[in-house]
Amino acid sequence: MPKVTPQQIENLLREYQLDHDGHITIEALGNKSARARFRVGKQHLRPGDTVSGPTLMALADVAMYAALLGEIGLVPLAVTSSLNINFLRKPAQKDVIGEAKLLKVGKRLAVGEITLFSDGDPEPVAHVTCTYSIPPR
């Protein structure tokens, strides 16, 4: 059972301007997992009308942050210490969904993976691994 709600995480994201002007929402929190959506607009496309890499990385980072906060509670100072992304195919010109899963949550570090999909497409557009540093309590 998550320690916080999606709404509490969205409020935190908005407070620290991490919601990308309201384009990112947290759709679900579960057991060491989260699902987030990036509502893609024209400003998120690069030449060739594909969703930009920075947009995909932002969604992956926020999805991981949400999964982590669901486990440890609202700890705003938990920060990304590494993020590696493998782009698998061209994202469609539509919303992108990020499904994050925590693989390990320790006292100081959390490791997870995020799979990114174009909305409605079962094939992933990117696979991401991410490590977060958790501040001492």
Image (cartoon, helix red, strand yellow):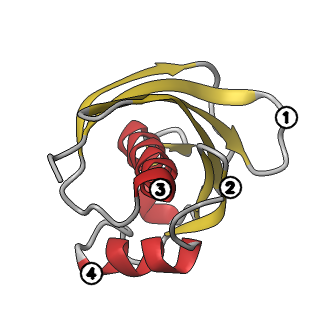
Give the side of residue 136 with respect to residue 72, left or right: left
Q: Nearer the viewer, mark 1 or mark 4?
A: 4
Q: Nearer the viewer, mark 2 or mark 4?
A: 4
Q: Which mark is residue 122?
A: 1
**Tag 4's secondary structure?**
helix
Choose the circle earlier in sequence order: 1 or 4: 4
**Tag 3's secondary structure?**
helix
Based on the displayed image, in which of its 4 quarters is residue 118 positioned? Answer: top right
Query: How would you rate the neighbour count of disc 3 (Cα within 10 Å): few for under 14, some for 14-19, many for 20 or more?
Result: many
Q: Name the amino acid, label 3.
A: Ala
Choose the circle earlier in sequence order: 1 or 2: 2
**Tag 2's secondary structure?**
loop
Q: Quadrant of the N terminus?
A: bottom right
Q: Nearer the viewer, mark 1 or mark 2?
A: 1
Choose the circle earlier in sequence order: 2 or 4: 4
Query: How would you rate the neighbour count of disc 1 (Cα within 10 Å): few for under 14, some for 14-19, many for 20 or more?
Result: few
Q: Name the amino acid, label 1.
A: Pro
Q: Label 1, label 2: how many angstroms apart (C-alpha)? A: 14 Å
Q: Image point 83% across, 40% down: which residue?
A: 121
Q: Position of residue 102 (x, y in %)?
A: 53, 34
Choose the circle earlier in sequence order: 2 or 3: 3
Q: Name the amino acid, label 4.
A: Glu
Per the image, the residue denoted by label 3 is 66
Q: Label 1, label 4: how many angstroms apart (C-alpha)? A: 33 Å
Q: Image point 36% across, 68% down: which residue?
A: 20
**Tag 1's secondary structure?**
loop
Choose the circle earlier in sequence order: 3 or 1: 3
Per the image, the residue denoted by label 4 is 15
Per the image, the residue denoted by label 2 is 94
